[in-house]
């Protein structure tokens, strides 16, 4: 029995779309009762907290090595910068101070918890992903894999730059201390400076992901990016100058220059993605709104634009 012309047209449209096999899986909307959602969320949260607790306990055990690593940028400073005169035969010293009985204990807690959270980030990010993924379309899952797999390495690279920039910033801050004044740097002050540098550099290195996310969402096109490129680069340098705890130019450049390079790399992605969308635009021609929604293509900016055109009768 031969198929009707409408069926053939619909089949041709479906073949052009190359719909993934998983899109017709059972329970495509991943629906479950509210109670099951709450139980699932509780299970994921408990597993994440357990992983963080284990990571914090391990960090507590290896705390002396971790503290030596954190204090190393301060100890790399020359002795004349530390302004701690050495006697004959004395060794280089980098002393930090405590002003309370519990300062050292609280600092060990803070460092252990922070290291535990960072070290177990793949575990709790996977738990978050496992909770969210069932409600996503296949295309959204692919983008989530991309963003999740890129966020951790970029944050780690930013942390590496921050670790190198810490000595430069500390040297600048200590060299501006007036002559005859002995700086009394407490461990809490130094730890706050180190964590601030880590967070600022780590989050700044996520900037290209934000650019790509805006492009994927259809908000930022390459034409618009190219128009505002100079403003974006100026904004990166202004942010680096304001955000870095130390006002020295070296720390600012260590933050701004890599971010500009990453933004330029993100521009290449934006350009390639816009060209890909332009080539794929003809694929959605001739589809009805129901067909676009059925295959989960309404989340694609190109398909959404085609859907608006179809509903408007253009």
Image (cartoon, rainbow, N blue to C red):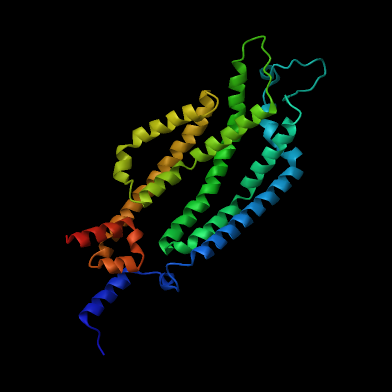
Tell me what residue is drawn at x 55 percent, y 37 percent.
Answer: 199
Q: Residue furthest right?
A: 89
Q: Residue sitting at 59 percent across and 15 percent down?
A: 176
**Does residue 183 appear left or right of residue 147 in this picture?**
right
**In the image as oriented, which residue stretches furthest toward the front?**
35
Give the residue furthest to the top. 180
**Seen from this angle, which residue lies furthest left?**
314
Return the residue nearer the eye: 17 or 40.
Answer: 40
Figure check: 138 above or below 144: below
Point out residue 137 in the picture as x, y percentages from the top left corner. 42, 63
Quarter holding the N terminus is bottom left
Image vertical order of residue 42 relative to residue 242, above or below: below
Residue 185 is left or right of residue 288, and the answer is: right
Q: Quadrant of residue 87?
A: top right
In screen coordinates, is 137 left or right of 164?
left
Q: In percent of the image, x 62 and y 11: which residue is there?
A: 178
Across and down, in percent, residue 16 comes to 30, 69
Vertical placement of 194 versus 185: above or below?
A: below
Q: Residue at x 43, y 69 (%)?
A: 28
In which quadrant of the rendered image does the C terminus lie?
bottom left
Q: Position of residue 8 (x, y in %)?
A: 25, 78
The quarter of the displayed image where residue 165 is located? top right
Q: Is residue 2 above or below residue 261?
A: below
Judging depth in this view, the residue of 26 and 263 nearest the camera is: 26
Residue 167 place in picture, x, y as percent: 62, 28
């Amino acid at each position: 029995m031969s198929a009707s012309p409408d069926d053939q047209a619909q089949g041709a449209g479906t073949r052009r779309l190359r719909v993934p096999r998983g899109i017709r899986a059972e329970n495509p909307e991943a629906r479950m009762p509210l109670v099951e959602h709450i139980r699932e969320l509780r299970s994921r949260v408990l597993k994440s907290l357990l992983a963080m607790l284990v990571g914090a306990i391990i960090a507590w055990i290896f705390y002396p090595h971790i503290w030596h690593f954190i204090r190393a940028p301060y100890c790399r400073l020359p002795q004349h910068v530390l302004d701690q005169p050495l006697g004959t035969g004395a060794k280089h010293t980098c002393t930090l101070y405590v002003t309370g009985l519990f300062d050292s204990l609280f600092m060990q807690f803070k460092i252990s918890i922070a290291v535990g959270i960072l070290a177990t980030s793949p575990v709790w990010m996977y738990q978050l992903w496992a909770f969210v993924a069932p409600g996503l379309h296949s295309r959204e899952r692919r983008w989530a894999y991309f963003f999740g797999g890129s966020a951790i390495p970029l944050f780690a690279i930013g942390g590496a730059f921050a670790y190198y920039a810490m000595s430069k910033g500390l040297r600048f801050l200590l060299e501006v201390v007036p002559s005859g004044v002995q700086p009394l740097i407490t461990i809490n002050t130094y730890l706050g400076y180190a964590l601030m540098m880590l967070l600022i550099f780590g989050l700044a290195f996520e900037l290209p992901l934000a650019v790509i996310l805006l492009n994927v969402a259809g908000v930022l096109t390459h034409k618009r990016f190219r128009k505002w490129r100079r403003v974006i680069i100026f904004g990166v340098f202004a942010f680096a100058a304001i955000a870095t705890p130390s006002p020295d130019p070296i720390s600012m450049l260590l933050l701004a220059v890599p971010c500009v390079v990453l933004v330029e790399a993100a521009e290449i992605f934006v350009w390639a993605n816009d060209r890909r969308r332009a080539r794929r635009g003809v694929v959605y021609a001739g589809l009805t709104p129901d067909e676009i929604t059925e295959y989960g293509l309404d989340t694609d900016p190109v398909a959404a634009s085609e859907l608006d055109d179809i509903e408007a009768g253009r």
